[in-house]
Image: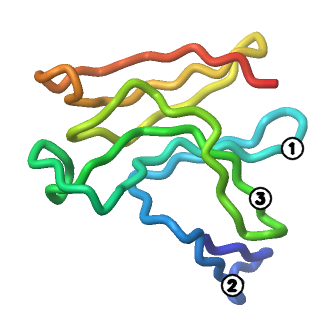
């Protein structure tokens, strides 16, 4: 995770300790950062990206500590990633694709964020 102030010439890098893919972040009205990411594991999954098991999850991002904490595993697996997020009327809407039900499909989740 890289953090910088304008003009973005000096970066501070944090190792999140986990391999992620297809990240998308959103800043909530209260200032917290939430990311939708593909979390990779070392477990094999021939249907997954790069032959590894994967899932799409929502994760809290702590910029000061440079940490990521998984908050919610979305129904997903196999080839899954590239979420989009928007907050409307205090509900987080998350779209993503996944092949966990066999055929790759697009999913839409409505999440209440406390």
User: Within 10 angstroms of label 1, few (less than 14), some, or many (20 or more) residues?
Assistant: few
Real-space CA distance between mark 1 and mark 2, rounded to the nearest whole angstrom: 21 Å
Query: For residue 96, which quarter of the picture?
Result: top left
In the rendering, at what x and y percent does residue 58 appear? 57, 38
Real-space CA distance between mark 3 and mark 2, rounded to the nearest whole angstrom: 16 Å
In the rendering, at what x and y percent does residue 47 appear? 12, 42
What residue occupies the far bottom of the structure in this picture? 10
- Label pair 3/2, CB-CB below 8 angstroms: no
Q: Mark 3 or 2 closer to N-term?
A: 2
Q: Mark 1 or 2 closer to N-term?
A: 2
Location of mark 2 (residue): 11
Marker disc for residue 89: none
Q: Mark 3 or 1 closer to N-term?
A: 1
Q: State the residue at coordinates (59%, 69%).
A: 16
User: Within 10 angstroms of label 3, few (less than 14), some, or many (20 or more) residues?
Assistant: few
What residue occupies the far front of the structure in this picture? 43
Left or right side of 4 for 18: left
Location of mark 3 (residue): 62
Real-space CA distance between mark 3 and mark 1, rounded to the nearest whole angstrom: 11 Å
State which quarter of the image contains the C terminus: top right
Q: Secondary structure at mark 1?
A: loop
Q: Secondary structure at mark 3?
A: strand
Q: State the residue at coordinates (36%, 18%).
A: 107
Query: For residue 7, which quarter of the picture?
Result: bottom right
Marker disc for residue 31: 1
State which quarter of the image contains the N terminus: bottom right
Left or right side of 103 for 65: right
Q: Secondary structure at mark 2?
A: loop
């Amino acid at each position: 995770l890289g953090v910088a102030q304008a003009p973005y010439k000096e970066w501070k890098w944090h190792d999140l300790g986990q391999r992620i893919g297809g990240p998308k972040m959103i800043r909530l009205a209260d200032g917290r950062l939430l990311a939708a990411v593909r979390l990779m594991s070392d477990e094999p999954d021939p249907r997954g990206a790069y032959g590894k098991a994967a899932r799409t999850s929502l994760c809290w991002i702590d910029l000061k500590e440079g940490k990521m904490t998984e908050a919610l595993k979305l129904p997903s697996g196999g080839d899954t990633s590239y979420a989009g997020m928007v907050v409307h009327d205090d509900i987080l809407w998350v779209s993503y694709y996944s092949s966990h039900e066999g055929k790759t499909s697009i999913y839409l989740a409505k999440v209440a964020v406390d």
